[in-house]
Amino acid sequence: MDYEVKLEIFEGPLDLLLHLIQKNEVDIFDIPIATITDQYLEYLDVMQALNINVAGDFLVMAATMIYIKSKMLLPDLKDEEEEDPRFEITRPLMEYMKFKEIAGDFSERELLNRDVFVRQIQPYLREQLADEGSQLDVNLFQLMDAFRRIVDQKLPGVQLKLQLQKWSVKEKTEFIIAHLKQKGSIFFHELFSEDQTVSEFIVTFLALLELIHVGLVKALQRTAESEIRLAPSFDENGENNNG
Amino acid sequence: MDKPLKLIIEAFLFASDRPITLREIQSWLLGETPSSIALALKELQAEYDSLQRSFVLKEVAGGYQLRTQSVYAPYILRMLKTSPTRLSRAALETLAIIAYRQPALRHEIERLRGVDIGGILKTLLEKDLIRIMGRKSLPGRPLIYGTTRKFLEVFDLKDLDSLPKLREIRELGVEQEQLAQARDERQKIETSGKENAASDENEASGETST
Amino acid sequence: MDKPLKLIIEAFLFASDRPITLREIQSWLLGETPSSIALALKELQAEYDSLQRSFVLKEVAGGYQLRTQSVYAPYILRMLKTSPTRLSRAALETLAIIAYRQPALRHEIERLRGVDIGGILKTLLEKDLIRIMGRKSLPGRPLIYGTTRKFLEVFDLKDLDSLPKLREIRELGVEQEQLAQARDERQKIETSGKENAASDENEASGETST
């Protein structure tokens, strides 16, 4: 190993690759693939020797580089119309450099709560105010996270069955309700389409049965031969008409 | 100190959400005497008064605070009334259960949250985030809850199908980011020699496994 | 209205903890035109500047907000006893990609960064810098990510259009050209007389990335 072991930590294969290119002061458009590949692999060895978990991403890049190196060693056999095999790593490197630079620009901006500070809501003002806000200050991630918390807390005696199937009755229930809301009433067959699998058929059907059962949907049929019609049994706000 | 004391104190007052005392100000600065700080506070007070701003420097609860003048209170209250409010953790959790499990029955939600949720359901209904979808034909004909169109709007969702699945929530693990943080920390602390670097390396990898 | 418009607006700015828009200001007042409000805001801006206060009036995230000048940051941080907002390098890079590529899919971002980003996405979601915009109609219905209003606030951006244009970034434009040139050069040397189909393709893919 002829290079100094000054271990920096790299975020990923592109980060390491960029470091090697800069350290060797080589042209990104003319990467000496053999040298860089060797150094890259040595680096992975060092990481492994130090018991650093080498992520799969690093290994994928190693494989790519070895492949490119081997391709470069076969000068005349390669298809002449093919581009320089090294561009396979040059291109992502270019993209990576671009966003690395932007990330640098980002961190140089006047960051809130690092460089600049704003007024805080003064408690004395809040006190004068009853909770009657109309807008909500909440985002989807908070909702998801709340659900994850609930599911993870494992209350005694509660068993949450996580549905593994692709379509849940719940989703199909919503689908049917949304459909009925939009169209007023629909024919039975409109709930199904030809590209559905049997299991999806069944789930949709179960959802429909459930809806009819709880009284949110009415199924109507004029004669035994005519198509079954489905009608909503709730008003615009989703309230059940039956009360 | 390369900035005028007066303006540094103004910055303190500006960024604080509560009254700050002379003693505190002194503790955040180096080598300033209470009297020089008191003088600067007096100067600020006089300045705001003479400039006839909408805010004044007030002595409250043993400290100093920038407050808007009371004549502006009606305007500010109008503003605060339309400001977004937060949902309590309990409300958010209840909403999450309804969103993911709908059509949901009250006792099912209570079973998951482990507490009575009558008040929360009322709040969520008032905020138009949930609705009563109907009644289940079970003893007692319990109400069935689901989310509303407003719910989709608030969470910027196209439809209920766009709600992330539990699996997707879990997939956003934490290990990777912790690793990155550890890396950055290390890069801040420039290692002097290679032995150091190597030993730090082990520590970093140790951290990630915990 | 018995108080000067300018000072009422100042009171709003002083009492709010988030940027307020011209539209909001208008909704809290009766019978004021957008142009008179805009004028008052301009006046305030000029006043704070000429008075050389510790804070300035800035346009961020589509609204207006009073912010301390960055020279006072060390003092305020001492007061707040908090460490400043810090994002790891990895998080910043991921955020940069999402900011420029939004709506962005996880696997697209991972392709660009070359690593798994699950944990980073979670951090960015937790910090409310990115949000889930919906799902893409692709196999697996992957989630789509974009930046939030908070992102604009934190990074002192008026709007998304204020992000520096990618092609304005120095060197990079040149590099793209160099890449294309280098390709051409090589092809001239190696494949004298062959069609440039491959090179055209490369250029096209280079363009889409800007």
Image (tube, coloured by chain):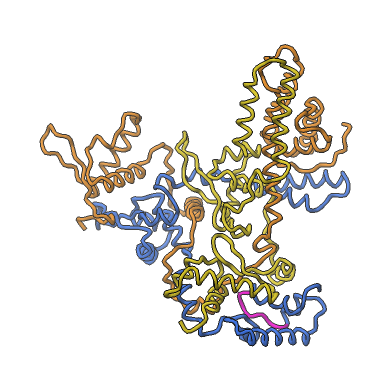
Chain colours: A orange, B blue, C yellow
- Residue closest to the eye, A207 or C208: C208
Residue A164 at x, y percent in the picture: 43, 38
Q: Is residue A3 above or below residue A238?
A: above
User: Which residue sits at x=70%, y=72%?
Assistant: C79
Q: Is residue B179 visible?
A: no
Quarter the N terminus of chain A occupies: top right
Side of A175 where C183 appears, left or right: right
Q: Which residues are magenta?
A: B16-22
Residue A205 falls within the magenta-colored stretch = no
User: Which residue sits at x=26%, y=52%?
Assistant: B136
User: Which residue sits at x=26%, y=55%?
Assistant: A236
Residue C6 at x, y percent in the picture: 55, 77
Quarter the C terminus of chain A occupies: bottom left
Residue B21 falls within the magenta-colored stretch = yes
Residue closest to the far top: A77
Side of A24 where A101 appears, left or right: left
- Residue closest to the eye, B92 or B140: B92
Residue B7 at x, y percent in the picture: 72, 77
- What type of secondary structure mainly makes up the magenta span? loop
User: Which residue sits at x=80%, y=53%?
Assistant: B189
Q: Is residue C58 above or below residue C104?
A: below
Quadrant for residue A229, please give it: top left
Q: Is residue B184 above or below residue B50?
A: above
- Residue closest to the eye, A203 or B49: B49
Residue C170 at x, y percent in the picture: 72, 45
Quadrant for residue A50, please give it: top right
